[in-house]
Amino acid sequence: MEYLTLILLSGIVFLLLFLFNRKFPEKQNLIYRIFIICLIAMFAVRIIFADAFDNIIALNTNLFTKPMTAFLAILRWFSFTAIMITCLSAFTKAKSYRYIVCFISAFLWLLNLIFFKQNVIAFVGTEEVSFFHYRSILFMIEMGLFGGIAIYELFVLLKNKEYPTKKQIGIMFLVYGAVTISCFPLSTFQVLFGIFGTALEDFNLTHRLFLYATILTLILLFVIFRKKDDDAKRTMLLTVSTSSLLLFCYAWNVFTFTFADLPLHLCNTAIFLIFIAFTFKVKSVYYFTYFVNVIGSFFAMFMPNTTSTLLSYSGIHFWFCHAYVLILPVLAMMLGLYERPNFKFMRNSIFIFTGYFVAMMIANAWINTFQSVDYFFLYGDVISSHLGFLENIRVNFQWLINISGTIYRVYWLYDILVYIGYIALMFLIWGIYKLYYNVEDHYKELFKLRKIDKLQIAKLKKEIGDITKPINPEGVDMIKITNFSKTYGLNKHKAVDNFNLEIHDGEVFGFLGHNGAGKSTLIKCMVGIQSITEGKIEICGYDIEKQPLQAKLQMGYVSDNHAVYENLTGREYINYVADLYMVSKEDRDERLDKYTKMFQLENAIDNQIKSYSHGMKQKLVVIAALIHNPKVWILDEPLTGLDPSSAYQIKECMREHASKGNIVFFSSHVIEVVEKICDRIAIIQHGVLQGVFDVKKLVDNNVNLEDLYLSFVENQKDKDVKELKKVQKLAFKLQNKK
Amino acid sequence: MIERIKTLTAMQLKNRKNRKAKTKTSTSISIIIQVAVCILITVALYLILNYLNELGILPIDTNFFLFLLFITQAISIIACVFGLANILYMEKDNTVIFSLPARPAEIFISKLSVFYITEFKKNLFFLVPFFIAFGLALKLGVVFYIFIIFMTFLLPFIPVFIGAIVSLPLMYFKKLLKKIPILKIILTLIIASLVIWLLVYITSIIPRPLKIVAIYDKFFAFLKDFIISVNVYSTIYEIIANVMLSINFWINLLLFVAILVGLAGLTIGIAFLYFKIASQNFENSFKPKKSQNNTPSKNTFFTFIKKEIILNLRNTEVFISHLLYIISLPVLLYVINEVISAIDTNLNGIAIAFAVNLLIGLMFLTATNTMCASAITSEGSEFGLIKTAPSDTSKICYAKFSVNFMLSLVGIISSVIILAFTSKFDGLSIFILFITFLFANTAHMFWSLQIDVLHPYLTEYASSGNIRDNKNIGTCLLIGLAIAVVVAVIGYFCFQGMNIINMLKLPLIAGLFFVLRLYLFQINLKTYFDKIQM
């Protein structure tokens, strides 16, 4: 009789779905959702009733044989999962969910049909169950809907020949398996194996296992879903939050429901809030759970206020629910489904929390007049048992309100302190979140950069084979700067803009410009101290960005700040530099001897540098730059602050170095010096190259270099602008003449 | 004159300020957080005072108030003496400031003003909450709270003035030590020996077995006597306390004003000697060295190691601090274990003792890893050379790490040897302690190095010449403290019941932490070292 009725009901649902979809083909989704909502309603009704089967411990029952009890426990668990997925299938595009409905739900419906009677006995706990028992009727309707929907979906799939591939079938089983674990009904373990493990307390093994499992679950879900699309991530969160809601409600018994069962404890409320946040995409609710509930569940998990055994009915209820409340908001943020919170979200969360807090104070005061409750632990001594000093405050600062003879009790100071403490914790967790965001951003950036670096090296290897060879073999005897630009940080202003220059061997090249024109910026990029924003710099054919080691080996650099280790001796410093440039002992002996004599440092070379004068330090830096006999010698304002004889020695050294076929490139403010020793000069103003001039040509045609320089500088009050422009024009004319 | 002092003060303050541009929101949030911290400190102090009062063993009265005020201000005076000796006479910006068209006395006053502002800010976070908490605990009237406002402004003057006065002879003494570096080392060793002797003496007089509960009353009676005897020497602060508590108000107020004026007068007197002393610090005398040879290193790593060793040995202050460090840790652990060994302990007690050893040891060890946290920063302008060198200069990090590591290793080994002879722990426990110290501390070194690789303050160091305001050091210390606490907690749990498998989990966790930090340091170094810009 029951079997026939169930088949009939399923048939009716199938037929109705078929007819409605045929009549309104454009509203198939809506029709499907209406049927699913009916199924959800029936499923929800089943959940709020207690089942006699859940009281079985380790298969000991008179109702069934042991194998049958074990089979029923597993069937109930698997069916629970299948019904939940069927319900969710209406709200997600995930294909695997559809296949589960078609194949697994249909199969489980068939099993439930066959074992219908045993199921009903499991509900009511007696073998004598009439056909008209309310649990029998409810289950029949539920199964009718479940079966009708599943078979209809299977029918559509077969009709449209949308057969899943082997991979899709594999994924289907994987998804079903994962969801089955996530909605582990509270009683299954107890029914199969009895009460197992010890109570959660004092970081004992059970407690630790529970904590490890929670953290591992979070990591595992993050690793699995981090690269999936947003739909898959949302489906997962929706599924898990639904599981947690169902598991939470599974513990209810509508006949023995009390005020204490109301989900008004913070973590219990969270189960509903998380479900609402993910299902209806309510941002403010999500951020509330992210800031407020995560803290609550964290404390609940680390200081479990339960004596239940880990794998008992209530133990599983406790840790599954709290673990979900801790994991889900954090996981949603880690997966990037929500933007990182700002103060607005925090403020809103504080507002909502304040409302909740006040409501709980009132609820505690009111309900405790006729029934004992302790919502959010604002009434009892749970918190003060951990923080002893609060107990005196709790007991001594009470507000007793007498309304019509009933005394309402509010522990006002204790509640205020708990409130302040919780708000402080919210700010603390925000700080921790921010710390996590920083770390996450940093390592994302790091791995991105590493990938880029690897790709660049691979590309270079592909282009030139051996990366120790010049990238540009034609440029081995020159410095080549192409379309170089440089900006600092996020600043949009270009310190140097689209700079192009070629300097050849044997040249002493002067670089002129006002303070802040971009001279030092260009030099620092040339020697590899600063990065290049755009363009390319080649030193003797080596790209300074792509082949930094090879390019640097060609260069000697004298900085504008003659920075040296003051506690080293001059010789130690030179040896230090020589070591960095891998200069042989013979070469360093010979060159050091030569240059110390040239710069008259023989008597000071073995003294600590801190005893040197400015000029001596500058000479030491010059020796250090020349100790490896570089092909390119770059000097940034080398003559600043030097006495005439020291300046002369350095100038002579520059000329001599260039005469050996090397390149000397230096920046300076002193026009006379530039005029005397340079072959060519470049003038830069506000980061833009104004022109490159041949000094000999200018001198031969009586072009005053100072006037030429000033012609590029704005606001020359003492000079006739027209005259200066003439000089500039002449200089450009000479430059273009071959 | 006043205008010039104002300008100089403003200039120095701006220079000290965080260079990061702050938005209005971030400033507001920062103010809110600071106020919240102040409130929290006040509440915490109030609760502590209330708790002590409730216990009834230590009366929270005017004597206790005076004692705490005296102790905190004494610490403040010591900090001011050393801080001002550096800021007034050693700061690198002196060369710039002295060239400005201002009288040396004006520069002196501007520097004192800057220091006063710093002290004032510090007081806001401790002194004000302390006063308020005391006022609440003693249920004092409104007048007391009004005086808090005045004292917040006036009280920092005393340590600053005393600091300015005492820093002058201190500088003379420092100069003498600078002239004769060996004297400094001898003096340090003498002081260190005296401290060690004192500690050993104190530990030797601890009664065995030490029953804390039995000496509870004795201890607090001693503490009460101690407070009264210390207060005898706190004349100035007794006057201040009397003013605040309205005891013989007018006489005490008069005395307080007289003291402030007197100190200010003396400080102004010092101002005229200021330039003479401060300018001498720019002058270098040198001793010619014997001729040396050019000796190439085998590789870049040895080049850096050689440089680090030379620089560390030639810097007497650094050398002494290293020496003190090597001596201090084993002595500290010896004292702790002597006290612990005097107490009869059960298994849980041993776990606590082990955790305390871990906590103190790691707090000390990690605090010395600031060398790693300023590895790149302390190169300053010299880092330009590293950037332009055609070799793998990232090895400089490992060179700096090696020097720090060697020092730590000496400290750890000597500590472990001392513990093996003095503590109650068995061989396995000592071995676990050694391995845990080694792994956790080395991991912290890598972490500290990584912080500096990611955010070196090269320009700041190049301009100031010191690492005092370096944020990386603060972060390094904070992380070190966190590591010490976490490892101690884990150690406590692992050693409960003295189960060998549980005990071995501690070095395993420390080892995993070490491997993780090493890996993270490596990838950060490889990715970001070349991207450091000057």
Image: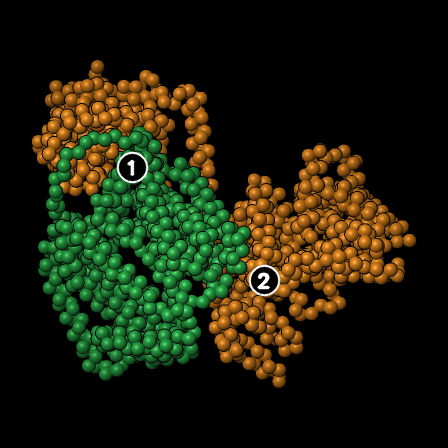
Q: Out of B286 and A524, give the one closest to the viewer.
A: B286
Say whether residue B164 is visible: yes
Instruction: Say which residue label 2 marks.
Output: A201
Give the amino acid type for the residue marked by disc 2 in the picture: Glu
Say whether residue B381 is visible: no
By what rule are the colours in the image chosen? Answer: by chain
The single residue placed furthest to the right in the displayed view is A1
Query: Residue sitting at 41 percent across and 24 percent down?
Result: A460
Task: Give me the chain that's orange.
Answer: A
Q: Out of B209 and B348, give the one closest to the viewer.
A: B209
Give the amino acid type for the residue marked by disc 1 in the picture: Phe
Q: Position of residue B138 (x, y in %)?
A: 36, 79
Q: Quadrant of residue A220?
A: top right
Q: Position of residue A313 (x, y in %)?
A: 69, 60
Q: Quadrant of residue B362?
A: bottom left
At mark 2, the secondary structure is: loop
Q: Colour of chain B?
A: green
Query: Residue sitting at 25 percent across and 48 percent down?
Result: B319
Up the image or down, B63 lies above or below A652; here it is below
Disc 1 crowd rating (10 Å Cα; few below 14, some 14-19, many 20+) is many
Up the image or down, B52 lies above or below A338; here it is below
